[in-house]
Amino acid sequence: MTILTYPFKNLPTASKWALRFSIRPLSCSSQLRAAPAVQTKTKKTLAKPNIRNVVVVDGVRTPFLLSGTSYKDLMPHDLARAALTGLLHRTSVPKEVVDYIIFGTVIQEVKTSNVAREAALGAGFSDKTPAHTVTMACISANQAMTTGVGLIASGQCDVIVAGGVELMSDVPIRHSRKMRKLMLDLNKAKSMGQRLSLISKFRFNFLAPELPAVSEFSTSETMGHSADRLAAAFAVSRLEQDEYALRSHSLAKKAQDEGLLSDVVPFKVPGKDTVTKDNGIRPSSLEQMAKLKPAFIKPYGTVTAANSSFLTDGASAMLIMAEEKALAMGYKPKAYLRDFMYVSQDPKDQLLLGPTYATPKVLEKAGLTMNDIDAFEFHEAFSVGLPPLEKFNNWGGSLSLGHPFGATGCRLVMAAANRLRKEGGQYGLVAACAAGGQGHAMIVEAYPK
């Protein structure tokens, strides 16, 4: 849920950034092709004295699918298990070497509230390997990764598996609160008289179901509404949003056709065919996209189904190690995980501005500038504003690849790492925003070839 602009006010400690990165139009029509590979001169490394280097050995993800399609009869731990199994096959890491497993998720299946543990057991990891689940909305997998980084950097662990999962095809739907209370009271009733007294209080409106909230708890506003208001505030037109969404789908299709989405592993869905690729990549035309009506603020909004990310099912997993451990085991890591930053701001007016605040802070922390970044991988749920297009989400983004809430963070990091290797860059910047007005940014440094 990212609005990638740099506002000129209310940007603490970063006003100089706001002036440097002023709002730019989203003219994408001439940039539907990814930028050619650029060999970047080696810059300084971000290694810190007396702190262990943390590396990504590799990462995988199941194909990201539109909810209600091939994964609709599964449970979240099935997808998470598939990602873990795919990671084991990709890396051949011995299961007993893994010290800890951390997964992110957002809408929890109540039967598997610690989905990391259930998926790990299902994938054949030892029952002696601890696992826990974190939730931080769209940056849940980011939190899983950085928690792993902290465990390794502090010397508590050497080998971490981090990932995330979301299954929007099947979400918990509860009875109303009144019905839940009645049922709990009935369960405690000790006599027939007490039961009859409670039953007499039943009303038919108690049967109205309680659906999972897709709005902010503190504001009762959906992210789509926030995107519409911010698009208006930053003067981003409907056409510019549609152009950017078309760019995302076109680049994703190109990357898919050229085999660049190498983190995707096939998944044999029980009772169905093997799924091998993302199914939400659908390049259209500006003419077709223009026919869609506003999805949130009607009739004047500019956010539509065509320029927003779709409800997605999918899972991801990454093998993170201390550098010395990875080298001792004979691995050639893909990237270092370097400085990262979490931010929070007003969830009403700045809900989607997490990367706007986190980006300058993490760059300052790392001693880098925007010009030092060779590959930007930002979560894009709505098409509103962006940094340099020639380096930005060149293999598609959440608008086209999909956005399983709990799994996207790992996809972003692997996209950055794989792009740096392919394009010869050194630094990638990963960023995303999340519900509650929160955000995350992290520097990924290519591992020397």
Image: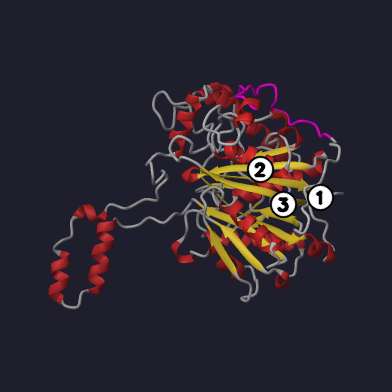
Q: Which mark is residue 337?
A: 3
| Residue type at numbered disc 3 | Leu
Magenta span includes 23: yes
Horizontal relation, residue 329 to residue 216: left or right: right
The residue furthest front is: 13
The reply to whether discs 1 and 3 touch (Cβ–Cβ < 8 Å) is no
Q: Position of residue 395 (x, y in %)?
A: 70, 38
- Sequence-first disc among 2 and 3: 3
Scheme by which the image is coloured: secondary structure
Q: Which residues are magenta?
A: 21-38
Note whether 214 is above or below 51 in the view shown: above
Q: Secondary structure at mark 1?
A: loop
Compare residues 441 and 392 and report the one nearer the observer.
Answer: 441
Please give the name of the residue rendered at 64% of the width and 67% of the height, measured from the top-left corner: 100
Q: Main secondary structure of the magenta part?
A: loop
- The residue singled out by tag 2 in the image is 362
Note whether 436 is above or below 382 in the view shown: below
Compare residues 32 and 230 and report the one nearer the observer.
Answer: 230
Please give the name of the residue rendered at 67% of the width and 40% of the height, measured from the top-left corner: 377
- The residue singled out by tag 1 in the image is 447
Please give the name of the residue rendered at 71% of the width and 34% of the height, measured from the top-left corner: 370
Disc 2 residue crowd, few under 14, some 14–19, many 20+, Cα 10 Å:
many
Note whether 136 is above or below 288 in the view shown: below
Real-space CA distance between mark 2 and mark 3, rounded to the nearest whole angstrom: 13 Å
Q: Position of residue 10 (x, y in %)?
A: 52, 32
Foreground: disc 2 or disc 3 = 2
